[in-house]
Image (cartoon, helix red, strand yellow):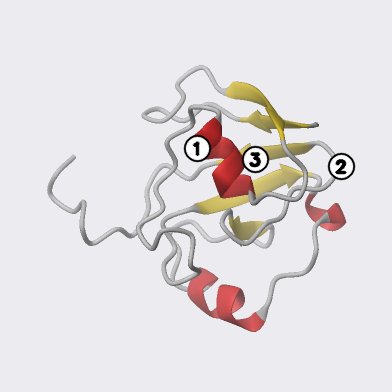
Amino acid sequence: MTQIIVLPHIELCPDGAVIEAEAGKSLCENLLENGVAIEHACELSCACTTCHVIVREGFQTLDPSEELEDDLLDKAWGLEPNSRLSCQVIVGTTPLVVEIPRYSINMTKEGKR
């Protein structure tokens, strides 16, 4: 198991979270399975940006993003150089520290917060 620290997010995990993630699964799947209800409007198919995260520690150990992910990330709110779509990050053996941005571009939720 790989430790993932999720920094506090006002709605999803106000106190932050420390989870033991399963290597070989996506970061998004691991978050969801451990009670962090990160948005994932496209059901993990790399077709939106709602599962955008910023990898604060461990970014250099991840497999590089592919062109489709990079193109989608260009549309993400709060994009940073170490941004990734959590549905595309495969958890390895290196611990990660991630931040879920406060906002996402989710057309299905607009006006429903």
Residue for point 53% across, 34% down? 33
Q: Which residue is mark 2?
A: 93
Q: Classify 33 as above or below 105.
A: above
Q: Report helix, strand or loop for mark 3.
A: strand
In x, y percent, where is residue 13?
Answer: 46, 25
User: Which circle, 3 or 1, is nearer the viewer?
Assistant: 1
Q: CA distance from mark 2 to mark 3?
A: 15 Å
> Dot 3: within a 10 Å radius of its alpha carbon, few (fewer than 14), some, or many (20 or more) residues?
many
Q: CA distance from mark 1 to mark 2?
A: 19 Å
> Dot 2: within a 10 Å radius of its alpha carbon, few (fewer than 14), some, or many (20 or more) residues?
some
Please, what is the three-letter code of the amino acid marked with disc 2?
Answer: Thr
**Which numbered tag is attached to residue 32?**
1
Q: Nearer the viewer, residue 62 or 29?
A: 29
Sequence-first tag of 3 and 1: 1
In x, y percent, where is residue 46?
Answer: 50, 69
Q: Report helix, strand or loop for mark 1.
A: helix
* Corner quadrant of residue 42: bottom left
The quadrant the C terminus occupies is top left
Farthest residue, direction top:
15
Farthest residue, direction left:
111
How many callouts does the rendering have? 3
Q: Classify 74 as above or below 3.
A: below
Q: Which residue is mark 3?
A: 98
Please, what is the three-letter code of the amino acid marked with disc 1?
Answer: Leu
The quadrant the N terminus occupies is top right
Q: CA distance from mark 3 to mark 1?
A: 14 Å
Residue for point 76% across, 39% down? 96
Sequence-first tag of 1 and 2: 1
Residue for point 63% across, 47% down? 27
